[in-house]
Amino acid sequence: MNVRVPRYDHDRIRSPRPSRGRRLLRLLRTPLLVAIVLSLAALYLTQPILGVVRDPASGGAAKRVDAGRLRHHVEELSQRFAPRDPGHPKNLDGAAEYIRARFVEAGLATSFQEFDVNGRTFRNVVATTGQAAAPAVERTDAPAAADLVVVGAHYDAVGPAIGADDNASGVAGLLELAPLLKDERGTARVELVAWCLEEPPFFRTRFMGSRVHAESLRKSNARVRATICLEMIGCFSDADGSQDYPLVGLGLLYPSRANFITVVGCVGQASLVRSVKRAMAQASDLPVWSINAPRALPGIDFSDHLNYWDAGYDAVMVSDTAFYRNANYHRATDTAESLDYPRMAEVVAGVRAAVAALAK
């Protein structure tokens, strides 16, 4: 007996038509996911901090920073010892001696860390304060006696520029941190380091003073909690459009006025960025912004902190954003008269609070 099997036209069998709500959800799904991802990326990039309250103790006389002394240091470095490039070794040596003398006046154990480049000797200036303070000496392979917080700034400049903001401002801040941190007694030592040879032609080479210092810490198995690099901290403006960014879209997330200081970190160091940012915001009236971004973003690793990253240490840069706001960058017009010393003083007060919190 022949049994006839019915044939079905599969092309004519259709699933139920989705409701209007489901169709709308499908249309919105992709842009919604994109919006969520972008929002999370923006939050990670900017690291917003909530509930920041100014610490009343930060305004005490012992914690105040003298804007006049900051200006004096900048004038000395940018006028008396200029140009400060490898072609003018006497000026570099004079600047190193000036920095050493100020550290000694502040009562800190101080020494030079010497290194040779092409047959010529250059020097980092290292001062130690805090727990287990001791003169900085040539390290051995023995482990460090205590955890360490490093704060530094490079004192060389691109010739023939005299480098007031870049980077006499950072060194001035370092010098004024010395007396403020002298009596801090946390559980970590603090090293204040003035690095040499940050600028071209030695930038990103093994001859950078910060590379020498970071490698010496790594070889001695030093327990470095964090490094704070002070890179140009004196240029500010309240004019609209005075702040620029490496990417156009960043202008949607950050201010258009160059009236703030920035804490710069790389991917994976959000916790350190938040800690430094919060401490600075609590101790200063100056707005503090931050960025956590890949090193491929132009400017993220454009200073000495990159050598501590490469050595395996956490590090941030505190900066006025350099050429993204300062038109005098690497020019003869980068003079002491162009800087804002009261706001520089706010930056130093904020950094002091951040160092104290890290060394606690």
Image (cartoon, rainbow, N blue to C red):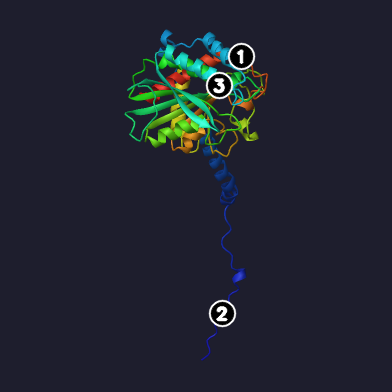
The quarter holding residue 31 reads top right
Q: Residue furthest bottom?
A: 1
Disc 1 marks a residue whose amino acid type is: Gln
Mark 1, Cα crowd under 10 Å, few <14 / some 14-19 / many 20+, is some
* Residue carrying label 2: 6
User: Disc 2 residue type?
Assistant: Pro
What SS does tag 1 mark?
A: helix
Residue 326, how many percent across, how many down?
64, 23
Whole-percent x, y for residue 331 in the image: 67, 23
Can see residue 265?
no
Judging by the rendered image, the residue that carries numbered circle 1 is 79
Residue 33: quarter of image: top right
Question: x, y percentage for residue 239?
Answer: 66, 19
Question: Circle 2 — which element?
Answer: loop
Q: Residue at x 40, y 36 (%)?
A: 219
Closer to us: 356 or 22? 356
Which residue is label 3 attached to?
Answer: 92
Q: Are marks 3 and 2 in contact (CB under 8 Å)?
A: no
Under mark 3, the amino acid is Leu
Of 92 and 254, the residue lying toward us = 92
Pick the residue in front: 252 or 261: 261
